[in-house]
């Protein structure tokens, strides 16, 4: 260890020690080091690779900010971008320098489909109840007006044929050059949402409800090359090697409604890669010229983020899932100049890059918008992407940003905490900088009540967090470098939560004589909690389970047995800080004020009391939980619970027999059974000490501490008559009739 490292370690230890004197709780270390953890934060001009390394990302430039909230489609023609918007139903022409003009304003709300024809003219499909327009000069020309409500996609073949994908009848129409539109394929689906052409020139169609990819030959016969478990195939992207990438989402179908205008709460996002077994898709669809029956109207997407996946369909028909997410919804895909997959997602505006085999996912960039709806390669090799909420067009270049910022997720200490040192590991080439800031507050979401961002922390070996004590903490990393980029590997923040009092949640005193054997014990299992036996080998007598509020302790008991004089006390306890607990078990007589100790320092939440060492009477038990093992001397806290009163009675009942009056044939024995602390529960008699017969008291109910009984037997059996009485505590006594 270097002197610098040693000094930093001593400083951190001193900080935690000083906090311990004030807080008296175990220190906690919040570490962020994996891609999954980093994806929960907010990234600006930074990328996060599959190994959880954070560095400066590609430069992003705003090209055009649209007045419409939704930009749905994008194509390049005549050296400019042509963009379809909603909910104003416009087609915009945006030049490379960001100059924009409205080329077409439709009567419909949405322009979901934009395509450039082989002649350089642009085709635009509108929805709902829309049509296909050719945009040439100042006068848009309607070229096709189908009966279908939605036009989702337009594809132009090398032959000049135009294909139009529609819903909610799931049809594809073909418009030959100079001809009229005719039905080309009727899918067994509610919508046809995307179109593309494979290397052989066959038309590929992505459908919605169900989500399938269908290859359609020139004669109109279809073959399903992918039957996904998702509701729709939103986009198709051919690759140079003959494979095709298909974007599948779980909404039903998502593009029939605009994205939500306001952010939706979502779980912490974690993108993951799953590689499936390669299989050959089977199944088919047939073309028909007859009109299909009406299908149900499209439904809005289900609330919350939709699941999604990207499939790679190989030229031989096999397919793999190369990307899958439970949190991010894919909208479109593209390929960079190295053949790596670029995925635009929502509802957090993330752009992922997938490369290598097996696939490895990196967060390439983060857009200042909720959805990335369309990706398009520029003439110079850079990429454009269109967004919604807000609607804008951005240019993503291969050049690296000079500066970037990453803001962590909000960390919940679960109680007010004193902050310790912030440390990080980073690779910083010459002339690169990594610095941190922190802020804290007592609301789950940062707002005006939070502290301001602190001054910069620059010492990676440990900087004392200057933010005030609070429940929540957040840090911000700033990266900069002109000729090289720094790389952040991990961040650790230490804090000391305020010590919270443990709680004994329940306390049970089992019935007299009820005991439990230790589980997992060999030989004759000892009684759990008796004379130190409650601590089973390897801690098997207790179960520790983490919970949202701390650690809950509850005993795991073995087989139930009966042992006269024993009383088993069992409890559950928890500590909000997750501290280790010790228990003291005390008792007192009901009429007394002071408590007496039965056992101190019990580790497991069970104790068995041998009550034969105590006088008969009514008692209460108290269990005190202490977090002393995890806290500094003088800083421990306790919590307790008390039982309801219960009786201890180890003395058998008394049988007082009145001498029987001699008679000729029969004799009647009258006797009284009494007990000092519990009711008389059962009285029996026997003439041979083997067969016992039940007797009832003279008042008919055995419910008092003193009961009167009588029994009549033959005069000759009087000498053999034996009486037996049992009280409510299972103490028994016998007596002869004479």
Image (cartoon, rainbow, N blue to C red):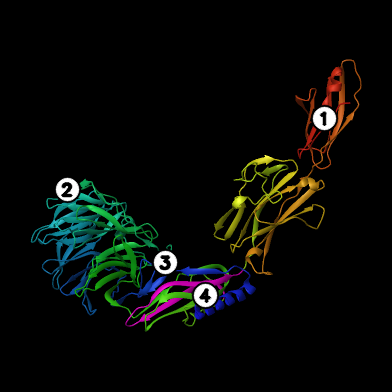
Residue with the mark numbered 4:
440
SS class of the residue under badge 2? loop
Mark 1–mark 3 distance (CA, rounded to whole Å): 80 Å
Which is nearer the N-term, disc 1 or disc 3?
Answer: 3
Residue with the mark numbered 3:
34
SS class of the residue under badge 3? loop
Mark 1–mark 2 distance (CA, rounded to whole Å): 95 Å
Label 4 neighbourhood size at 10 Å, few (<14), some (14-19), many (20+)?
many
Pick the quarter of the image with the C terminus: top right
| Residue 73 is covered by the magenta coloring | no
Magenta span covers which residues? 469-498
Mark 3–mark 4 distance (CA, rounded to whole Å): 23 Å
Farthest residue, direction top: 664
Which is nearer the N-term, disc 3 or disc 4?
Answer: 3
Q: Can residue 99 be seen here? A: yes
Residue with the mark numbered 1:
698
Between disc 4 and disc 2, the foreground one is: 4
When asked about the image quadrant of residue 363, the answer is bottom left
Image mark for residue 287: 2
In percent of width and height, residue 573 lies at 63, 56
**In percent of the image, x 59 and y 64: which residue is there?**
577
């Amino acid at each position: 260890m270097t002197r610098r490292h040693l000094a930093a370690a001593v400083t951190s230890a001193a900080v935690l020690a000083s906090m311990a004197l004030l807080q008296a709780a175990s220190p906690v270390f919040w570490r962020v080091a994996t891609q999954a953890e980093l994806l929960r934060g907010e990234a600006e001009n930074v990328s996060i690779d599959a190994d959880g390394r954070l560095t400066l990302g590609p430069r992003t430039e705003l090209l055009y900010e649209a007045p419409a909230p939704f930009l749905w489609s994008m194509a390049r023609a005549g050296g400019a971008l042509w963009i379809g918007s909603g909910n104003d139903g416009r087609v915009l022409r945006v030049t490379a320098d960001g100059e924009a003009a409205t080329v077409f304003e439709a009567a419909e709300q949405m322009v979901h489909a934009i395509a450039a024809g082989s002649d350089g003219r642009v085709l635009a499909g509108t929805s709902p109840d829309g049509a296909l327009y050719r945009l040439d000069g100042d006068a848009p020309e309607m070229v096709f007006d189908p009966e279908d409500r939605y036009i989702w996609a337009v594809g132009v073949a090398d032959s000049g044929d135009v294909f139009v994908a529609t819903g909610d009848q799931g049809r594809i129409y073909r418009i030959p050059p100079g001809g009229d539109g005719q039905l080309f394929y009727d899918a067994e689906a509610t919508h046809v949402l995307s179109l593309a052409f494979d290397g052989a020139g066959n038309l590929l169609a992505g459908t919605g409800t169900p989500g399938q990819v269908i290859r359609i030959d020139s004669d109109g016969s279809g073959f399903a090359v992918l039957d996904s478990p998702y509701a729709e195939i939103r986009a198709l992207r051919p690759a140079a090697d003959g494979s095709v990438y298909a974007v599948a989402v779980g909404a039903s179908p998502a593009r029939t409604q605009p994205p939500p205008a306001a952010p939706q709460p979502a779980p912490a996002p974690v993108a993951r890669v799953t590689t499936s077994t390669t299989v050959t898709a089977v199944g088919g669809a047939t073309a028909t010229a007859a009109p299909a029956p009406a299908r149900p109207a499209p439904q809005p997407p289900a609330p919350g983020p939709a699941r999604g996946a990207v499939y790679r369909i190989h030229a031989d028909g096999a397919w793999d899932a190369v990307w899958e997410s439970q949190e991010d919804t894919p909208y479109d895909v593209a390929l960079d100049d190295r053949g790596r997959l670029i995925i635009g997602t929502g509802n957090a505006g993330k752009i992922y890059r997938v490369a290598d085999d097996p696939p490895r996912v990196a967060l390439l960039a983060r857009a200042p918008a909720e959805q990335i709806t369309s990706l398009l390669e520029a003439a110079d090799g850079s990429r454009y992407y269109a967004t919604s909420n807000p609607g804008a067009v951005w240019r993503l270049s291969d050049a690296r940003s000079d500066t970037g910022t990453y803001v962590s997720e909000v960390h919940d200490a679960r109680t007010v905490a004193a902050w310790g040192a912030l440390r990080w590991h980073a690779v910083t080439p010459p002339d690169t900088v990594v610095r941190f800031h922190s802020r804290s507050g007592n609301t789950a979401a940062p707002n005006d009540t939070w502290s301001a961002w602190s001054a910069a922390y620059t010492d990676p070996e440990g900087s004392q967090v200057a933010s005030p004590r609070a429940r929540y903490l957040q840090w911000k990393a700033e990266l900069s470098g002109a000729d090289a980029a720094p790389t952040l590997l991990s961040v650790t923040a230490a804090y000391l939560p305020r010590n919270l009092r443990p709680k004994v949640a329940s306390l049970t005193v089992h019935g007299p004589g009820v005991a439990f054997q230790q589980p997992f014990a060999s030989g004759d299992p000892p009684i759990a909690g008796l004379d130190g036996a409650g601590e089973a080998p390897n801690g098997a007598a207790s179960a520790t389970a983490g919970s949202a509020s701390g650690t809950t302790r509850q005993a795991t008991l073995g087989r139930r047995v009966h042992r006269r004089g024993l009383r088993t006390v069992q409890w559950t306890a928890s500590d909000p800080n997750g501290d280790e607990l010790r228990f003291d078990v005390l008792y007192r007589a009901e009429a007394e004020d002071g408590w007496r100790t039965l056992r101190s320092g019990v580790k497991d939440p069970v104790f068995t009391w041998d009550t034969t060492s105590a006088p008969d009477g009514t008692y209460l038990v108290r269990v005190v939980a202490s977090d002393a093992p995890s806290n500094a001397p003088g800083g421990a806290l306790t919590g307790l619970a008390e039982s309801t009163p219960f009786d201890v009675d180890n003395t058998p009942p008394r049988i007082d027999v009145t001498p029987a009056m001699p008679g000729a044939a029969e004799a009647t024995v009258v006797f009284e059974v009494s007990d000092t602390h519990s009711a008389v529960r059962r009285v029996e008699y026997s003439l041979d000490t083997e067969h016992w017969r039940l007797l009832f008291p003279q008042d008919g109910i055995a419910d008092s501490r003193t009961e009167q009984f009588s029994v009549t037997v033959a005069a000759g059996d009087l000498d053999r008559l034996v009486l037996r009485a049992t009280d409510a505590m299972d103490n028994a006594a016998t007596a002869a009739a004479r």
